[in-house]
Image (tube, helix red, strand yellow):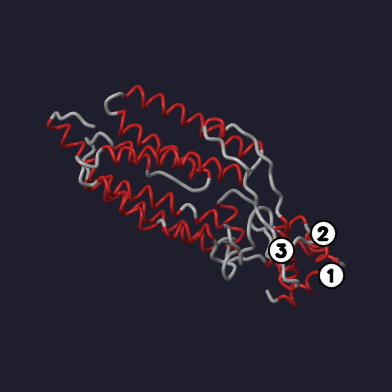
Amino acid sequence: MPLSTRRAFVSSNGPRPTTTAMASALPRYTSVRLPAAVATVTVLLLMSVTTVQSSQGDKEPVYRDCVKQCVRTNCTGARLRGFQSAQPRYMALTGELLLLAGWTCRDDCRYQCMWTTVGLYQAEGYRVPQFHGKWPFARFLCFEEPASALASLLNGLACLLMLLRYRSMVPRQSPMYHTINAFSLKMDYFCATAVLLYSIYLCCVRTLGLRRPGVSSMVGVLLILLFTSHVSYLTFVRFDYGYNMAANASIGMVNLLWWLCWCWQNRRTLPYWWKCGLVVLLLHGLALLELLDFPPMLWVLDAHAVWHLSTIPVHFLFYSFLIDDSLYLLNTEKMGVKVE
């Protein structure tokens, strides 16, 4: 929507503060702060409570007044019925499929007022702010973050393709077959933590569990408790982006060091060890893209989408390692050789 149109939207729905008045109250930059220190012990970190940082954009009076006036004017009576009748069917259908209310009139007011506020920031030379913990994105169909949605879909397809290849090449009798199949059933965000924790469990089973099943079972129970605590905190206490990032960084470091130690220990006996080492280094290196946290290019492509896209090729190398290792374990089991 052009800036002039966005300004007209606010003007037609009530007064707003002047650009100069808003500019005097704005800082010269906006940032999302992470907690000052990350606990070195993962258990303590997952149980800790950190302060939520509000987004600059949704704190602005011009944004709040715009949303309030828009909702009051357009989201009741005949105008609300007009909005609902004009809403594309795919917007409402998406909400129904997800058991949500679809794209509501209030959501539309927030979207329009967000762009109005962004236009004012840019006109005064300030950095684009975040709104409700997210950068402004240009909506496409029913997707608020179209690039991330597409990248997530491609990631899922890559995982599915390689999982099918794994199942076709590795017999079910392989010691790690079922553990790896369970690992492949992953999602995003909450489950970014689940994937990291399960990767730790996978490493535990591979390094200890094949000889000491009781140890891997106890570690599995502990990881389930940690994950339950983490999700419960984000769901029922507060959805804290900084805490979630810090928790994942700490868990990821445990995962990284454990796998690298295993790779180093087996570098002389397993010719495919380098695949595992390269995968964990790439995944944790690419995860730094999430920390860049820049405003989306062309209002579509942000750091999260770039991270999703960059990890797609890693899946092929990762499953190549899993296939090699599963076949190795199966052969050594048949020969009665002790697995290291």
The residue pinned by badge 1 equals 20
Residue density around tag 2, few if under 14, some if 14–19, many if 20 or more, within 10 Å: some
Q: Earlier in the sequence, mark 2 or mark 1?
A: 1
The percent coordinates of residue 284 (x first, y second) are 43, 49
Residue density around tag 3, few if under 14, some if 14–19, many if 20 or more, within 10 Å: many
Q: Amino acid at mark 1?
A: Thr
Q: Residue at x 41, y 27 (%)?
A: 219
Which of the two marks, 3 or 2, is nearer to us in this view? 2
The residue pinned by badge 3 equals 114
Q: Residue furthest left?
A: 335
Q: Nearer the viewer, residue 142 or 326?
A: 326
The residue pinned by badge 2 equals 61
The quadrant where residue 8 appears? bottom right
- Give the secondary structure at mark 3: helix
Q: CA distance from mark 3 to mark 1?
A: 18 Å
Which of the two marks, 3 or 1, is nearer to us in this view? 1
Q: Judge from the rendering whether residue 297 lies leftward or rightward of residue 1; answer left or right.
A: left
- Give the secondary structure at mark 1: helix
Q: Earlier in the sequence, mark 3 or mark 1?
A: 1
Q: Amino acid at mark 3?
A: Met
Q: CA distance from mark 3 to mark 2?
A: 12 Å
Quarter in which the N terminus is drawn? bottom right
Q: CA distance from mark 2 to mark 1?
A: 13 Å
The percent coordinates of residue 3 (x first, y second) are 72, 75
The percent coordinates of residue 112 (x first, y second) are 72, 66
CB-based contact (under 8 Å), mark 3 and mark 2 = no
